[in-house]
Image: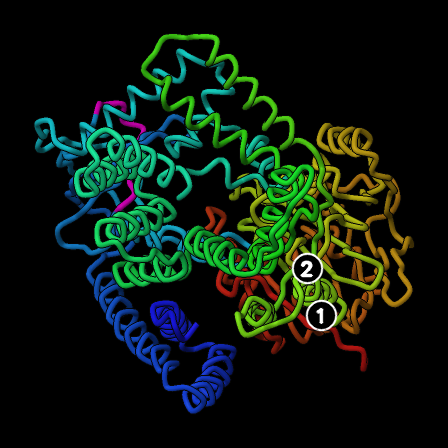
Amino acid sequence: MKKRPMVLIFTGVLSGMAVVWNILSMATAFYLLAGLCIMVCMICFDKGYGWIIAGMILGIIFAASAKISMNLDFSQVRYNETQDIIGKVVEVSQTKTGKQALLLKNDMLEGKILLYTSNDEEISSGDVVSFRGSLKVFDGATNPGQFSSRHYYFSRGIYYHAYSKDILIKKSTELCLDQMIARCRKYLKQQLSMQYDEGISNFLNAMMLGDKTKLNDTVKDDFKESGLIHLMAVSGLHISLAGRSIYRLFRRLCGSFMISSVIGTMSAVFYCALTGFSVSSLRALIMLLIYFLSQILGEHYDLLSSASFAGVILLLIRPYRIYDTAFLYSFTAVFVIGCYQRIKPRLKGKFQKIRESLLFCTAIQIGMFPIIIYFQYEAPLLSFLANVIAVPLASTAFTVAFVLIFLPHTIFHDIISWMIYVILWLSKRSYGMLTIGHVPFFWVILFYSLLLLCTSQRNKLQFKIRIGLVYTGIVLLIFIPKFRKKTITFLDVGQGDCFIADTNAGLIISDGGSSSEDQVAKYRILPYIKYLGYQRVKIAVISHMDVDHYSGILELLKMGRIEYLGLPEIQKDAAMEKIIEAARQNNTKVFYLSRGRTIKTKDDYLKVLHPVKNSKMEKNAASIVMQGNVLGYKLLLTGDVEKEGEEQLLGEGLSHAEILKVAHHGSKNSTSSEFLQKVLPEQTIISCGQNNRYGHPHKETIHRLKSCHTKIKRTDTNGAVIFREKRDG
């Protein structure tokens, strides 16, 4: 790599920016120290590696400047204060619920504003609008494994979001470039809807124009789990196909490198704008410009150096892109392709093209495996089989659909539809999902270091041995969960409850619901389950039939991800009947809990103290209360029990608890002084949502907890509260 200084500079820029954005992390300090030691050794061996240090200094300077600028921007905003704000419309889109989403640029702020409105007035790109509302900064992830809105939007230069019904167009712009592009995009969407059925046109909209708003979640999930999700994005491949095809066409027509390159570049830039300037399309555009320049100058085009230059440019323009998974996936894929090209064997004989395609897809999957596991915690093992068929089909469908997009419906459109149907069918198949869970970033670096050594031109090992070494790295990644310490977690689910214990017998969940977060299982509970390295829950318990305790459990039931379900042994209501039916349809075994019953594994147990069988108490008062020992901790889980139920509990074998989950989100009617004197908790957990409309936790409850000298942790301020396994009693 020392012969490719741009690759070394890109590596340094990435490292420098990672240090700045994670400066307070102990892990960062370790990686920085270890990295500096390695680089010093490398520079002593060969001064050519000094480019890494140069790149790191560059990355630190630009990232530090961006961080300072971002903090200054935040200091100018009056948060949660209603105010009049003016901005120029950069982009107009629509949410699935029918609201307009306006991307605005305010002259006083560096970050853009994402404004949601139910106002149906026609607004176009370039218009200047004013609205009355309050700005909020996007939240980061509060649970391990959770999607971070902050990282996603910040990496796109969007810092704030707001909602307002009252929008006034202060200045309506004449036709501008943005409006021309928007109209062109709208026209192409109309053409696709006329030429194809709804499902096919929605897929082509995503693949050709980057618009996924009309794709339903089931289709997206199918593509993600089959390893074909990359087909639903405007990738660098599409930009390259469009740019190079036009370049070759004009090269044949006029014979001029310059004219062909200029027309090819203009076409690629326009298409890039048409699809919203995604990070992968920008990367491909820069690489395409370098390719055209190499053709004009008659120089050799190097894939890895070109990609590195594109990466450096994109990071220097917006340093926060280091958190963009699309950026990391795109560049990892390019570098894996570059490494594969250096070691790929020459195949001969029958089915040469098929074998080459299969080998290429396998190599890409192996190379992408660690970074996919790092971000998604799971990967389909055999997805390369689907990609061998789907990628050529998608590329052909894309090219032909683009050529025919201005024509009326023909038989060729039907052929494209059949191609897409095959791709959709492939996405619904299972390809052996392997869920590993969270892996330390150190292991990812170790894998790619091994990959680099295996593809080094100095390495004289046979191709089979090199592949064997790479597989060894993958096996090491797979066995990491064996060394992961078990945990108990009180997850942040907004206004709701969710307790998760990672035991040797599998996952045990007590409650899982929210009244403030939609699809709480999909976006908070299931990601954490995968983070721990599981696909299914062994035992789930619902304390009582309030939506903020069962909504996520119901989602998991419908996904078929719960093996056993425990319900209170009381009279069934409509909510319980709905849950039981969902369990029956998904082969989940239901059992009932009342006083005296025990959930027991080899090492842990939870004993039910309340309610008695067929209790007639009010719903909250009849919540399941469990006390026991899990991972070495004495726990007391109380559901929403209060008043009558809590009074009854005082005579039902309550004992000291190291960890108490406070009842009813810290309501003033629960957790009495008498109750606390009986339990004497060392640590108490309050599960509630930020600024919830109930005012939880109430001041009276907090006062009582402080009076008994317990350590208070809250999910609305601390996020997920996690305790590591202890076995010393």
Mark 1 burial class by Cα count in 10 Å: few <14, some 14-19, many 20+: few
- The residue that appears at 54% across and 40% down in the rendered structure is 229
Mark 2 highlights which residue?
532
Q: Which mark is residue 35?
A: none
Please tell me whether residue 134 is drawn above or below residue 211 in the rendered image. Answer: below
- The residue that appears at 57% across and 72% down in the rendered structure is 453
Q: Is residue 306 left or right of residue 689?
A: left
Q: CA distance from mark 2 to mark 1?
A: 9 Å
Q: Amino acid at mark 2?
A: Leu
Residue 140 location, quadrant: bottom left
Q: Is residue 116 within the magenta segment?
A: yes
Give the percent coordinates (x, y) of residue 126: 15, 35
Give the percent coordinates (x, y) of residue 511: 70, 49
Q: Amino acid at mark 1?
A: Arg
Q: Foreground: 393 or 581?
A: 393
Query: Which of pointers 2 and 1 lies earlier in the amino acid sequence?
Result: 1
Q: Foreground: 200 or 111?
A: 200
Label 2: element kind? loop
